[in-house]
Each structure stands twice: as structure tokens, then as C-alpha cells.
Amino acid sequence: MDRFQIQGGLPLQGQVRISGAKNAALPILCASLLTAEPLVIHNVPPLRDVGTMRKLLAGMGLQIEVDAQAIDGQDSLTLRADAVNKLEAPYELVKTMRASVLVLGPMLARFGEALVSLPGGCAIGQRPVDQHIRGLQAMGAQIDIDHGFIKAKASRLKGARITTDMVTVTGTENLMMAACLADGTTVIDNAACEPEVVDLANCLIAMGAKITGAGTDRITVVGVEKLHGADYTVMPDRIEAGTFLCAVMATGGQIFAQGARADQMGATLDKLRESGLQMEEQADGILASASSRPKSVNVRTAPYPGFATDMQAQIMAVNAIAQGTGLVVETIFENRFMHVQEMRRLGAQIDIDGHTAVVKGVEKLTGARVMATDLRASAGLVIAGLVADGVTDIDRIYHLDRGYDRMEEKLRSLGARVSRVKDGT
Ligand code: UD1
């Protein structure tokens, strides 16, 4: 297992290109199941999670051609689902990546059946998929839970009115994809408004789907008989961009996040501005500079356009060295404070009271050996390591590799001293 070794204390300086969005690429890859024609997808980040999704789809019989690093270091993929022969998402893949459940809706809609392993709990909480199942049932699917698998069948799905109990991103995506090939009109209320949902909808529209309202809490899909191939470019990763902006806020310096789109990052940019980051929105990215110690900010995670739970650990790292005390309230996942005890090992003063972390900023952190526990927690620890005095070793960096494209290379290009150490060295 690789680890990161960071020699902290240097400001970040330079330009970094933001990769394609993981959380848009994964559902868009699954959309290829909805047509027998080739779907060409550009700006796909070369990440572990994308590799897992490719493995899952290839195992079902999809032909996948990869033009590696075709444009700006991102892959272009051509997926052909004209000879799908196995309608199954096995446990071994679903357990490593919950987003595997995104094959359920498309498989069921196009082939009339699907067998998808139930994702278990994960590090950050229980994360059930009951809303995905309920929505598909409302569309006429017959679903049984059998030996740990979701077993779904339907002759042709029927349009339905669905109101989800809570805002769910992949739930909305699964139902929206399924509705594309259903008979009649589906209305999804309480839909997730995340930009990644909009990106998926735009790809589906390019494939011939009739979708309106993506980006609002009511999505309407008029089912069609067939979708066709398309050529689509994935949006930039707003979480990766936000992570680099938090990093420069914490370390000081100036960076240009090339490709970052301010219009998709409102809540993150508001909090960073409040914290003291100076930002200039330019045509192809965001120029950000920090010349003083951050000021503490209060943050409450919420569905988009609220503050993203995927940015919570990173803003906590900024608060850890800020002036004053900041409250960080996590409302989406029940167990997403595992980075707190690791940040404490670096000298952070953080108390947890239920869903609230009280972060009392300290003047400096000191390097130590810490452990990454999940994807975004790892990013928070990297930021803390970049400001800490001395050396910080972050174990289990495979969590970070799930969702960040060559982060150590990007940080090094900004002047940070970060290396990847192989196990046993
Ligand atoms: C997606 C993102 C993830 C992000 C999360 C919240 C992808 C691939 N992943 O995850 O990075 O942290 O949104 O922004 O896009 N819930 C249920 N039943 C369901 C579905 C969800 O109870 O059927 C609950 C979850 O346990 C959680 C909340 O709803 O408490 C939101 O989860 P959801 O939006 O579904 O997260 P994901 O789509 O899995």
C-alpha cells in the first residue's frame, strides 16, 4: 500500500489543470448501457474508480476502447454495448465502489433484468439504496432482495411520478437513466440538483433522451423507444478544484486552477472568500491567492447548491490552522468525521459533538504519521500535511487514488514537496 510523504510548510505557486469530474464520468459511463451504438466520452479522468467501472462494464460484455491521455492528460473512451451478455454487477466490484449501483437503472430499462450486489455499509455511513429500488418499483419493476443481490425484472418500465424521501445523487441518476427508455413520462420530484446530474442529463439528451428540468428539483423524462450513440465531454471536477483552492488558502501562495468553473462551485467559493482567499474568475479557470492566515468559517453540508459534503474534510483542514473557531456540521452522512482524529495527531484542536465538529484554529500543525480513511478525508489530510511543520506520512493513500488524478504530481508542479512511497520503503 502506497503512502504519501509530505514535507510541509511551502506555499503553492503555479498552474494546475483540473481533471474531468469523477462523479459525472461514472454515471456517464453507465449511460452507455442504454444504447447499442457507440458512446464516445472525452475528458475521463484516469482514476481507480473509473478503472473499477470499466471492469464492471467489460465484465457485462461491453467493448471499451481507450485513447489514453487523448486530451490534456484525460482519457477518451469509446463504449459499445451491442453484445451485452451478463446482466450482473458482482459483489467484488460493488463492495469497492458503491457507484456500481448506477448500472441497475440502465440495465433494467434496456434489457428488462438486472442482478446487482447490494452495497454494504461503507466507511462514511450506511448509505442504503432503498430510494433507487422504490423508484424503479414505481416504474413497474419487480424487485427482490435475494442472497445479498438486488434482483430486478421488468418487461418495459412505465413512466411514473416519483418523490424521493431525501435528495440522492446516484438515486436521481439511476431513475433518470431508467426513465429514458420507459413507456410514458416520469417525473422525479425532490431530485438532486448537482451539476453532475445535469452533466449526465446533457449526455443522455445528446443520445436522444427527452429530459427537462435537470438542475432543478423536478426532472421530467419522456421515455423513448431507443437511444443512439453520441460524443460527449465530461465536465471539470468541482471537488478537485475546490480541494486545490482549499490547499492554497491553507498554505498561502497563488494558483491558477485551469478549467475550474466558478458557476458550479458557489458555496465552496463563498466560504473560501469568507476565509480570506482572493479569487478572480477568468475565462478558463480561477486565479486564487492567499496572503494571510485563513479566518475560521462555519460550514453546514447540504445537497447542491449547499456546501458539498465532499468538501467538508478539506475546509476542516483550512479551519484547523485558521484564526478563530469554526463549526463544521455534517448533515449528509452519519460517520464522516474520521479525519478528525488523524488531524488531531497533527496538532489540530477539534472536538466533535454529534454531527458538529468544533474546530479551534491553531497557529501551526506539526507533521506526523496518519492514516487515510476515505477519499475526501485523505484530501483533508493532504492539505493539513502541506501546512504542517516537518514530515507528514499519510498511509492508505489508495483511498485518494480512487478520486484524485495524479495528485502528487499536480502538487509538485505547484512547488509542494510530496512523494509517493511504496510499501516497505
Ligand atoms: C454521491 C456522490 C458522493 C457524495 C454524495 C453526496 C457519486 C458517485 N457519489 O453519492 O461523492 O458524497 O453523492 O453528495 O456521485 N440515501 C438513502 N437511501 C438511498 C440513497 C441515499 O438513505 O436510496 C441517503 C444516504 O445514506 C445519504 C444521503 O441519502 O445519507 C445522500 O446520499 P446520496 O446522495 O445518494 O449519495 P451517493 O449518490 O451515494
Image (spheres, grey):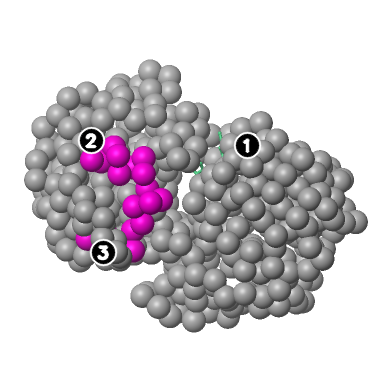
Q: Which residues are magenta?
A: 256-274
Residue mark closest to the camera, 1 vs 3: 1
Q: Looking at the picture, tell me which residue is in the foreground, 234 or 117.
A: 234
Residue farthest right in this picture: 155
- Residue 333: which numbered mark, if any? none
User: Which residue: 34% across, 52% down?
Assistant: 262
Q: Amino acid at mark 2?
A: Glu
Q: Position of residue 395 (x, y in %)?
A: 33, 49
Ligand 1 neighbours mark 1 (CB distance < 8 Å) = no
**Mark 3 element type:** strand
In screen coordinates, is 347 left or right of 145?
Answer: left
**Mark 1 element type:** loop
Q: Amino acid at mark 3?
A: Val
Reading the image, the residue beneath label 1 is 190
Reading the image, the residue beneath label 3 is 16
Q: Position of residue 88 (x, y in %)?
A: 75, 59
Q: Earlier in the sequence, mark 2 or mark 3?
A: 3
Q: Main secondary structure of the magenta part?
A: helix
Ligand 1 shows up in the quarter that is top right
In the rendered structure, does residue 272 fall within the stretch colored magenta? yes
In screen coordinates, is 395 left or right of 39?
Answer: left
Q: Are marks 2 and 3 in contact (CB under 8 Å)?
A: no
Q: Amino acid at mark 1?
A: Asn
Q: How far apart in space, not on screen, are marks 1 and 3 (Cα)?
A: 36 Å
Reading the image, the residue beneath label 2 is 274
Residue 282, quarter of the rendered image:
bottom left
In the picture, the quarter occupied by the C terminus is bottom left
User: Which residue: 65% across, 47% down?
Assistant: 219
Q: Are marks 1 and 3 in contact (CB under 8 Å)?
A: no
Ligand 1 neighbours mark 2 (CB distance < 8 Å) = no
Q: How far apart in space, not on screen, are marks 1 and 2 (Cα)?
A: 30 Å
Q: Looking at the picture, tell me which residue is in the foreground, 144 or 43.
A: 43
